Amino acid sequence: MKYISLFISSLLLISLVGCAGKSLDQAASPEPIAEDAMKAFNKGNYITALKHFETLTDRFPFSQYSLMAELKSADCHFYLDHYAEAISAYQAFEENHPTNEAVPYTMFQVGMCHYNRLDSIDRDPASAVDAIAVLNKLIRSFPQSSYVDEARSRITAARNFLANHEMYVARFYIKTNKLKQAEVRLEYLIDNYPDSSVTTEAEKTLALLKSGKKPRGSWKDWIPELGMPDWETFTSFKQGGGSES
């Protein structure tokens, strides 16, 4: 009985080793994982695609698919609205592959991560500032990139957002009778955003304050709006332009 038990155990061990060997043989090939990853990505199944791309980078860091997996993992995070994770992934790609032809794209995407985080004009405008900084860097670093025109459009929109934020704060100061603080914000708006959609209103409001008059506003002036422009105002969108993939 003892020998029979040992014999059976040996057979089970051989069987398990054989199964494990077969599994390792399958895992040793990155092609099917890459294929499944792209199928999921193209169907918009970004969670599934992300898992496959991460498997590729973890198991096959030196394969021909690893570069693609790094970039598409960042894209998955972007389309899932995981902007903090996407920023980290895009920036890691830039650091690891500074001469890669996809760097202008990753820079643009980092800018878009910040841009897409913009909220209503009564909130912290830091994301607009960050978007402008990244997109300006893209334009300086890659002036011939196909992303430059759209980057400029996004910068214009983000600057308009910041101008609207300043106007909102100035109105709040006027409402609360802090007129000197309102003047400071209006002067800042006029000096820094001379071409914004609210600059003319800011100039008129500042002129009234300088003359010793308190502007009158309707209740609508105190309702914050998103402050983002209609994209039809930008040439690249009128012509049907968009992001590269």
Image (spheres, rainbow, N blue to C red):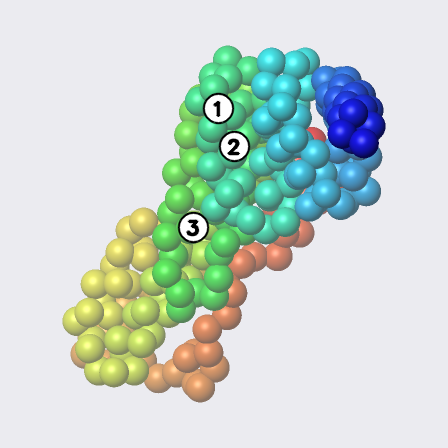
Residue for point 53% across, 40% down: 86
Judge whether 12 appears above or below 205 on screen: above
> Helix, strand, or loop for circle 2?
helix
> Helix, strand, or loop for circle 1?
helix
Can residue 232 be seen at all in this image of the molecule?
yes
Residue for point 67% across, 38% down: 51
Mark pair 3, 2: CA separation = 19 Å
Residue for point 47% across, 50% down: 158
The disc, 3 or 2, on the residue closer to the chain's N-terminal end is 2
Residue 59 appears at what percent x and percent y? Answer: 63, 23
Count neighbours of disc 2 (C-alpha within 10 A) and say few if under 14, some if 14 to 19, many if 20 or more. Answer: many
> Helix, strand, or loop for circle 3?
helix
Q: Are marks 3 and 1 in contact (CB under 8 Å)?
A: no
Name the quarter where the C terminus is drawn: top right
Residue 125 appears at what percent x and percent y? Answer: 38, 57
Residue 131 appears at what percent x and percent y? Answer: 45, 43
Which residue type does callout 3 highlight?
Ala
Count neighbours of disc 3 (C-alpha within 10 A) and say few if under 14, some if 14 to 19, many if 20 or more. Answer: many
Which residue type does callout 1 highlight?
Glu
Residue labelled with disc 1: 94
Mark pair 1, 2: CA separation = 6 Å
Which quadrant of the structure image shows residue 229? bottom right
Which residue type does callout 2 highlight?
Tyr
Judge whether 112 appears above or below 167 on screen: above
Can residue 26 be seen at all in this image of the molecule?
no
Most foreground residue, 224 or 116: 116
Q: Are marks 1 and 2 in contact (CB under 8 Å)?
A: yes
Which quadrant of the structure image shows residue 162? bottom left
Residue 186 appears at what percent x and percent y? Answer: 28, 63
Residue labelled with disc 3: 128
Most foreground residue, 106 or 34: 34
Badge number at residue 90: 2
